[in-house]
Structure formats: C-alpha cells, structure tokens
Image: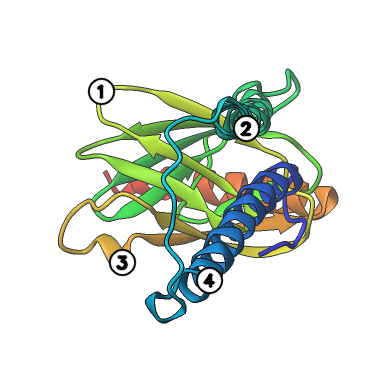
C-alpha cells in the first residue's frame, strides 16, 4: 500500500493518513466521552444532568476546530490534484483505448499492445478514450485513477519510480465481464524499454508487410 511505485504515492498517502488519523482521534474521543457519561450519570447514582442553554466558548470551539481541519484537508487534496493534472512537458504520450472488456495502448511510433510498458523515472502522459461505455483507468500501486468516457478525451499522467509489474483495473462497472477488464503496467529500465519498443516496431512492420502480400 505504501510502496513508492510512483510520484503520487507520498502525497496520496499523506492525505489518507491525515484524514484517517483525524477520524480515529474523534471516534476515540467521542466513544470515551459517551462511556464516561454512561457511568457518571447512571440513574442508580441519582445524578441528574443539567441542560446547557448556551455557551459561546463551546460554540466557537466546535465551529473553529472543524473549519481548520476541513481547510487542511482541502489543502492536501488541492495540492495532490494540482500535481496530478499538470503533466511535465517532456512526458511520453501514450494513447489508451478502453472497450468492453479490454485495454489497448498505442505508443508514439504506432506500436500497439494490450499491456502498458513504460520506462522508469520517465513521466508518462496518457490520452484516455472509450469506444463504448464509461470505464476508469486505475493503477492501485501508483495511486492513480482517471475516468475514461465515450465522446470525451481525458488526459492524465504518472511518473513510475519502481521497476516491476503493476495491476491495471477498470474501476467503473462497465458490463457483465467488468471483472475481466484487467491488464498491467510493466516498468522497465530505459535501455530495456528502448530495445523492446524497437523490436515491437520491427515486428509490427513485418506483420503489416505479410498482410499486404497476402492481399
């Protein structure tokens, strides 16, 4: 969950940890106070609670503290959102096409694959398009998700920082075989990626030539 697989992991995890910590703190505080009141004002002890009709300090406290917490949460969220929508100028652009029920990836040189291969430490900008219904391009290890909608081209980017193979899911229910809409991102060293891409380009040219001869 906390593996540094992309540049977004730290900001997303920090926001997540802060919000969960605030929730756990207030859950513990409220639960503790409820238990204390149950025992303190138990009927058997003949203690009677007294209503408070107004308390300016109390009202200021429960207004100011939540406001500050919400502003902090908004700040973390805005910083993360700004980071995710502004792709670097040197990003490698890859076209991502979603359809029921598969992913297709097209590289700048025209190579097409059903698995996404990218070089490590290279920003990747994805152009997202759907051929049919709503989908959502989701890479859990990268803390990265973007909707893929028909008749609309969405864009997003990520910076892979760890070698390996990472799952790609569709996070939007898209039909009967939604659970089969699975692929992967393979992060490679730059030289290995260049070799792989060149080999795929040559292979695709050979296939195109063979098809043309048969016709």
Q: Earlier in the sequence, mark 2 or mark 3?
A: 2
Q: Is residue 128 left or right of residue 11?
A: left
Task: Indicate whether 79 appears above or below 132.
Answer: above
Provide the residue designation for mark 2: 61
Cβ atoms under marks 1 and 2 closer than 8 Å: no
Provide the residue designation for mark 1: 151
Please tell me which residue is depicted at 43% across the width and 73% down the height of the picture.
46
Between the C-alphas of marks 3 and 1, the distance is: 23 Å
Q: Quadrant of residue 15?
A: top right
Provide the residue designation for mark 4: 40
* Crowd rating for badge 4 (residues with CA inside 10 Å; few <14, some 14–19, many 20+): some
Task: Indicate whether 85 appears above or below 15.
Answer: above
Between the C-alphas of marks 1 and 2, the distance is: 49 Å
Please tell me which residue is depicted at 62% across the width and 58% down the height of the picture.
141
Disc 1 is placed on an element classified as: loop
Between the C-alphas of marks 3 and 4, the distance is: 56 Å
Please tell me which residue is depicted at 47% across the width and 30% down the height of the picture.
54
Cβ atoms under marks 4 and 1 closer than 8 Å: no
């Amino acid at each position: 969950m906390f593996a540094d697989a992309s540049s977004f992991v730290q900001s997303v995890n920090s926001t997540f940890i802060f919000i969960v910590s605030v929730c756990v703190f207030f859950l513990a505080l409220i639960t503790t106070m409820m238990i204390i009141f149950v025992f303190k004002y138990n009927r058997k002890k003949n203690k009677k609670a007294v209503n408070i009709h107004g308390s300016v300090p109390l009202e200021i406290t429960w207004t100011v503290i939540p406001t500050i917490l919400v502003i902090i949460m908004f700040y973390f969220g805005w910083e993360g959102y700004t980071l995710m929508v502004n792709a670097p100028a040197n990003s490698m652009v890859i076209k991502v096409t979603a359809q029921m029920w598969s992913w297709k990836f097209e590289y700048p040189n025209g190579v097409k694959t059903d698995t996404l291969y990218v070089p490590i430490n290279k920003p990747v900008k994805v152009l997202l398009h759907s051929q049919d219904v709503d989908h959502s391009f989701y890479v859990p290890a990268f803390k990265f998700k973007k909707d893929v909608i028909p008749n609309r081209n969405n864009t997003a980017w990520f910076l892979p920082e760890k070698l390996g193979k990472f799952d790609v899911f569709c996070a939007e229910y898209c039909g009967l075989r939604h659970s089969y809409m699975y692929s992967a991102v393979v992060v490679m060293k730059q030289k290995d990626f260049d070799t792989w891409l060149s080999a795929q380009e040559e292979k695709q040219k050979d296939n195109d030539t063979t098809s043309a001869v048969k016709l």
